[in-house]
Amino acid sequence: MRSSNPVFTRRGFSRDSGYAGFHAGPQVQTGTPYVGSPSNPYAQPGNPYAQPQVGPAGGFVPPAAPTRAGVMTIDSVVSRTALTLGAVIVAAAAAWIGDLPVGAGAAFGLVALVLGLWQSFRREASPALILSYAVFEGLFLGTISAAINEVAPGAAMQAVLGTMAVFAGVLFMYKQRIIRVTARFTRFVLAAALGFVLLSAVNLIVALIGDGNGLGLRDGGLGILFGIAGVVLGACFLALDFKMIEDGVAYGAPEKESWLAAFGLTLSLVWIYMEFLRLAAILQGE
């Protein structure tokens, strides 16, 4: 089953091994579940970082995280994520201080959407494209946040704190294996994401042709419930991101995949921030 996060659909999450792993082509017989596995493109016989190891009882164990240069590591993921999120934050601060009009923010958001989709459907990561997306996304977030903060003072800071809390909470629960990214979990997230996006699209269409309130998903009690559902869905995206990173490090993914990991984490965090921002605005307007 592939990930609901568009960044990882080509690396995907498959259920071949009973859990969410990387998707690859036909299996190559090697005698172990780790080399030539159809669930991981880095666990191939020709990959020097994915050779099996013999355990104490003579059985095979998964390969340890690679230490050679040129492969994905936690440090490389952290550094790329810091660059990407840093670009978002700096651009957002510039837009906030510059007091840009909402129309300009909408234009920045459209450009960020195009760049994000472009990267999502590329076969390889493009650092320039990812950083460009981060800049335009930051300009959009800064403009929208400033506008909302005018009518709901403190909403932006509340959204930042909420996003940080969700990230820390999901990371803790993932590390403690309280959250387990299985094939069933991935199918649930995919279905929930599809339903959420479709319902949002219907709400937008009704709002455009109706009285502007749509189905009532952007305000009131229903809006609060919808916002909470969006935050929970974003937390699930983070769990999928953590699984992708864990597998990439364990199986010696190319170092360039660190940019994709950073891109995926940025998408998930932006999603969560926007849902918290909307929730804060709704709650202050009640």
Image: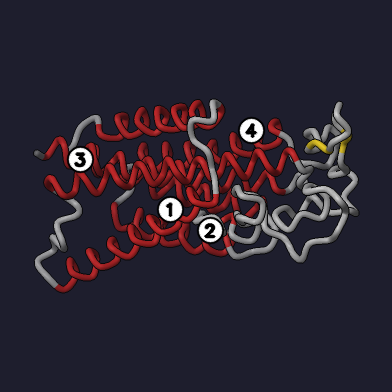
> Where is residue 78, by image quadrant?
top right
User: The disc labelled 3 sits on which kind of residue?
Assistant: Ala
Residue 98 or 216: which is nearer the viewer? 216
**1 or 3: tag closer to the N-terminus:** 1
Q: Is residue 211 above or below residue 22?
A: below
The residue carrying mark 1 is 188
Element on which disc 1 rests: helix
Mark 2: give few (<14), some (14-19) or many (20+) Cα within 10 Å.
some
**2 or 1: tag closer to the N-terminus:** 2
Q: Residue at x 86, y 59 (%)?
A: 29
Residue 41: image location, x then y, percent: 75, 55
Which of discs 3 and 2 lies nearer the camera? The answer is: 2
What's the CA distance linking mark 2 and mark 1? 15 Å
What's the CA distance linking mark 4 and mark 2? 20 Å
User: The disc labelled 1 sits on which kind of residue?
Assistant: Phe
What's the CA distance linking mark 4 and mark 1? 28 Å
Element on which disc 4 rests: helix
Q: Is residue 265 visible?
A: no
What's the CA distance linking mark 3 and mark 2? 28 Å
Q: Residue at x 20, y 40 (%)?
A: 281
Residue 11: image location, x then y, percent: 65, 56
Number of marks drawn: 4
Element on which disc 3 rests: helix
What's the CA distance linking mark 3 and mark 4? 31 Å
- Give the number of the disc on residue 6: 2
Element on which disc 2 rests: helix
**3 or 4: tag closer to the N-terminus:** 4
Does residue 47 appear to the left or right of 271 in the view shown? right
Residue 28: image location, x then y, percent: 84, 61
The residue carrying mark 4 is 78
User: The disc labelled 2 sits on which kind of residue?
Assistant: Pro
The residue carrying mark 3 is 281
